[in-house]
Image (cartoon, grey):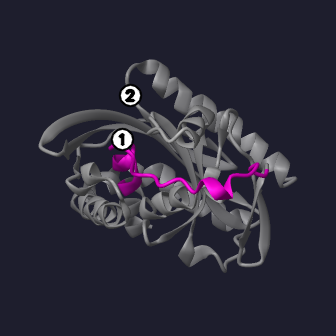
Amino acid sequence: MKTYLARLIAVLALALSVGNTYALDQSAVKQVAKPIEVNISGTRILIPEPKNYSDPSSMMPAIRQFGENMTASTNRLLSFFMSDDDVRALLAQSAPQLHRYFMVQTLRAAEGVNMSEREYGMVRDQLKNQYKKLFDENAARMQTEIDMAVDRLKKDSKSPQAKELSLKLGEMKVLDVIGDDSYVSLIAKTLVQANVNGELKQIPMVMGLTNTMVKGKILYFFAYARLNSDEDIDWIKSQTAAWLPSLFAANKVQ
């Protein structure tokens, strides 16, 4: 669990626009299905789209690759949701803002496990009690994961701007840990320092890291936003609160 938590934080540092790093495949444009169906070790799970967001991976393969680059090796990316405005920007050959986005992942090591409610309760309680401690203990490892993710982005990117990208993660400040029997969610903020072509940028970020279980499978719902005001923190909480019931309803989980 420690290794997983240390690695999953790496994705937050990549929420910045570094120019046109996304190559659009116009020939593959089509309507994105709703909800998204995924298979976790033979278990069919439906992943609903957050309101006004969609996963453009089927019509933009480079977006899927971008999401894969942002996903720790311990996890498997299930969906990458961008705002409809960002998708329209990509279709118009413009750079997306990525001010807010979502990722849904699962833990590779647990894919073959059908977890019971009791077992999930133990995982949930461990996360709820140890989130802050794990962040503090694994700060150096988080930065290593970020460096690895940036290297992957540089390798795949066609943007000269992205080639000089470097990112440094600031101290993580936990704002809230919430949940009930069905999930646990951490709300935290940090400051990401980015160096792009010699220009230093300070990017405040807020994120929600939510752990839940559907049909015996662990899912992680990550919501990210650039932090401009408390409204962004409220947005993270409201999006998580709205998405979880839709997930359970789609999969008929009571």
State which tag comes first along the sequence, 2 or 1.
Answer: 1
Q: Quadrant of residue 157?
A: bottom left
Image side of residue 170 versus residue 20, left or right:
left
Identify the residue at horizontal 46%, vertical 72% (top origin): 74
Q: Is residue 20 magenta?
A: yes
Question: What element does badge 1 sit on?
Answer: loop
Evaluate whether residue 69 shows in this view. Answer: yes
Image side of residue 21 versus residue 87, left or right:
left
Q: Where in the figure is residue 19, as x and y percent of width and height? A: 35, 43
Q: Residues within 10 Å of mark 2 (few under 14, many from 20)?
A: some
Q: Where in the figure is residue 249, as x and y percent of width and height? A: 84, 46
SS assignment for the magenta stretch, majority: loop
Question: Quick check: marks 2 and 1 in contact, CB under 8 Å?
Answer: no
Identify the residue at horizontal 45%, vertical 33% (top origin): 99
Mark 2 or 1: in front is: 1
Q: Which quarter of the rendering shows the N terminus? A: bottom left
Image side of residue 245 versus residue 91, left or right:
right
C-alpha distance separating marks 2 and 1:
12 Å
Write the start and end of the magenta stretch as one range. Answer: 10-33
Q: Identify the residue position indicated by label 1 in the image.
A: 16
As rendered, which of 69 and 115 lies closer to the eye?
Answer: 69
Question: What element does badge 2 sit on?
Answer: loop
As rendered, which of 15 and 23 lies closer to the eye?
Answer: 23
Vertical side of 53 occupied by 133: above or below: below
As rendered, which of 20 and 173 lies closer to the eye?
Answer: 20
Q: Where in the figure is residue 55, as x and y percent of width and height? A: 64, 49
- Checking the image for residue 227, the label placed there is 2
Vertical side of 193 occupied by 214: above or below: below
- Amino acid, disc 1: Leu
